[in-house]
Image (cartoon, rainbow, N blue to C red):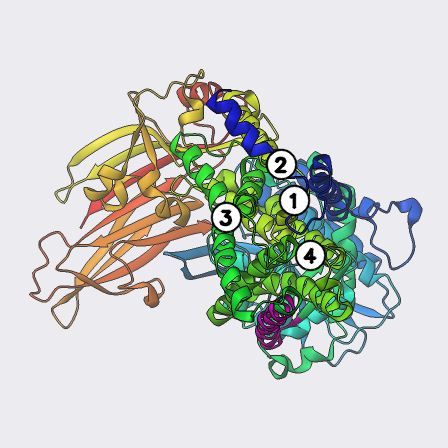
Amino acid sequence: MGDKERLLDEFSSDESVSSNGRRKSPWYFGIGFLLFWLILFVAVVMPFFHHVPNPKTMEDFNKGEFIAQRAMDNLYNLVKIGPKVVGSFNNENKTVQYLLNELALIKEHVLDDYFDIEIDHQQVSGSYIHWTMVNMYQGVQNLVIKLSPKNCTSDTYLLVNSHFDSKPTSPSAGDAGQMVSIILEVLRVMSTTRQSFQHPIIFLLNGAEENPLQASHGFVSQHKWAKNCKVFLNLEGGAGGGRELLFQTGPNHPWLVEAYKQNALHPFATTVGEEIFQTGSMPSDTDFGILVKYGSLIGLDLAQNINGFTYHTKYDGYEIIPADSVQSMGDNILSFVRALSNATELRDTAAYALGPSVFFDVLGLYVVSYTESTGVILNYSVAVATIILIFVSICRMSGISQVSIGYVLCWFTPILVVQVIAFVLGIGLPIIIAYYFDKCGLPLTYFTTSELMFGLYVCPSLFGLCLPSYIFLKLPNNRKVSFGQQLQLFLHSQALILSVLGICLTLYGLRSTYVLTWTLVFYVLPLVLNLITSLHDRSLAWIGFLLIGQLVSFLYNTYLQYTLIKCMIAMMGRFGRSTNPDLFMSGINALGTVMAMGFLIPLVNIFRRPGLILVTLLTVIGISIYVATCTHLGFPYRAKTNVERVPYLHVRRTLYEYDGSISKDDSGYLFNFQDRRGPAPLQGTSVNLTGLVGISADCEKYMMCGYPLYDHRWVKNRLNAMWLPREQLIDPPRVPEVELLSKVIQADKQTIRYKFRINVTDHTSIFIQPYEYVNVTNWTFPLAYIDQQTTYHVYFSHGRDSTPLSFFIDCFKSNGVFNVPLFQMGVAGHFIGDKGDQISQEFAKSFPDYAVLIEWPTSYQRFIY
């Protein structure tokens, strides 16, 4: 027999009788055991996750109910308008007029005996600091509706917010046309239903969220009703389909989560999602932060984010939004609005600030919630109780085996070490696979064929969890500690690891530790029952209660794992080039598998030939790797459904020196690839990228690399941006005129004030970099931004008001010599919606159908003053 055959024989063979003389179950029961859990996931978890109510139509009409058909009609008309970029005719005129017409129709049918309704059309300008830039807006629009009970005396309001503007090229059905349509329908139902509520409701349809977040800042900082708003619901759309996820709460108001718990007809929520989002690692933002920071409001942030592959693209159309998901969210929002508009807590929200919450739904059936302080007590209590019960179990084992406790503890020590190795392998093997796929230039193989994650990440995790115990139990048997006891000790080791980890994460302040705690609860409860009934002492009889407990644990942990995968998989396609998204997805799958199967996978050792299970897992892993690397199924992108995002600018770049001469005047395409693969998927296609280079080397020579970076995300990713030179110069629609109005030395003789006027485009970025010997001491923009970084970024946009931008800069120089260069200024004028010249249009047509382009002409001028 050859070495290969001998190894396989050893790997797949096992004694048919365990060390205590108990005959093991047939090997195929082991395969069936694993299949049972897989079938349970497919048959229970997935249907519960995707369950939404049937959409109501006008034929189902009853007073006081949300009707999805009416909302979908509004959505259809909104989508038909097309992209709604701030400053465009579509956004500032067509959309606003359509919404005003709809609001007028709603107002006509208001129950005058019950309600008063006011509609205010706000046009607002302002500025604030957002991430690494001054976010300045001019003439952006809000439609604000106030619905009040007749003769209402309450001066505290509920705010319901979403936005109608869009990203470039997007018809914005998912983000956030569906939310606007839901708000219109909720307003329609509330204003035509005989009911009572205590507090007026403000419905805010804001016209500049994608810019980002400008219109909500304009409302909360300047609108006459804003100071009365105390609680808000923020509705967002990161995709289309499924239930909306509650992913931000409060902050520090558990009663809001309790209100969600009592009123969500189709609950979907988790603290895990909140903590992941608030790390800032997700490529998204919402008005939630603006309303909390600048309005001192509290609220709930809810978003539909399943199937977000077409988010912010031209394929975000009406056809991708299921009516049942609109019905689901509409039911919830209508229920929340009714509940919160009657909440006594609105009268004094500060009295209910009791800290953060721990919250999660269970299969969409109900919500579990409690305060963070309660969670800390629960985490510590369960962890300590687990450790105590493990010791009690070991004491019982010593009595049954007639050996000392010290002897069992000595046997427990190597088992604990082996289980630690299994725990590390269970998490580490999927991450290693993700790392090497990335090294081979093959990230995102699961982007379209998500089933590949089972073979690439779940099976390696199971293999890592199972292998150490399999090897250990194949070693010479210990006759004093039975096979069943050894198996229990492996499970105790897993519980001990989770307990210690739970204590550490609780000390760290992670509320998501609840996942560990509740996983331990459903291990400890069966252990208590086994100890009470003495099943603990009878060979493998304790497995029955264990499996019942693990049934609950498995269902929740796989539900959470599936939730995170479905919500985040599409985000991996816009995670940027600097981060390997596979590490993120492999980590989610690994942790989910360890939590769901950590107490189950060692049980395969009760069956004959457990090595066959390991061989089966290896086979699935091998097949998955082959499919991912050698077949079309592993290619990430598909036309229209799972697209590659390719944002780029058609740039005309002119660099002026201090004396006014031009040192560079060229053109090209500036790419900001949004996923890890970058330009690689386009190689070998019809698009000609010959000469494409990274711009990182230019970042050391020029201010902001010398290119017209669009917004804060482009600035953040600038080291990964790429430049494709073009011989023919681009002639943009116009070049913003930068006019130096004056420069005046101030009274202290060490400061000079420069005044400028720029006839800006509706999206303009201005970069200012003082030389080392110069300090900017004052300027038109928010002062808090000065001295935070070496290059200042002012992101400016306008809605209906296209008045030129005027501003001043005060430069301090200690020696008072001002006839030398003091600062550089770059002005990037963006012409969103313009298709560019004929050469640019032909270039765009050469891209493959799976590449969705987000592109427009841009002029860039660099001046030295």
Query: What secondary structure is marked by label 4?
Result: helix
Quadrant hosting residue 665: top left
3 and 2 marks in contact (CB < 8 Å): no
- Specify whether 474 is left or right of 759: right
- Specify whether 484 is left or right of 580: right
Q: CA distance from mark 3 to mark 1?
A: 19 Å
**Percent position of residue 569, x then y:** 57, 41
Query: What secondary structure is marked by label 1?
Result: helix
Q: Earlier in the sequence, mark 1 or mark 4?
A: 4
Q: Earlier in the sequence, mark 1 or mark 2?
A: 1
Quadrant hosting residue 493: bottom right
Which of labels 1 and 4 is toward the front?
Answer: 1
Q: Nearer the viewer, residue 828 or 417?
A: 417
- What residue would you read off at disc 4? 553
Q: Nearer the viewer, residue 29 or 510?
A: 29
**In the image, is residue 117 above or below residue 320?**
below
Q: CA distance from mark 4 to mark 3?
A: 18 Å
Instruction: State the residue at coordinates (6%, 65%).
Output: 815
4 and 2 marks in contact (CB < 8 Å): no
Which of labels 4 and 2 is toward the front?
Answer: 2
Main secondary-structure element of the magenta-colored stretch: helix
Which of labels 3 and 1 is toward the front?
Answer: 1
Is 206 in the magenta? no
- What residue would you read off at disc 1? 604
Give amino acid for label 3.
Ile
- What residue would you read off at disc 2? 613
Q: Which residues are magenta?
A: 370-397
Q: Is residue 85 visible?
A: no
Q: CA distance from mark 3 to mark 2?
A: 19 Å
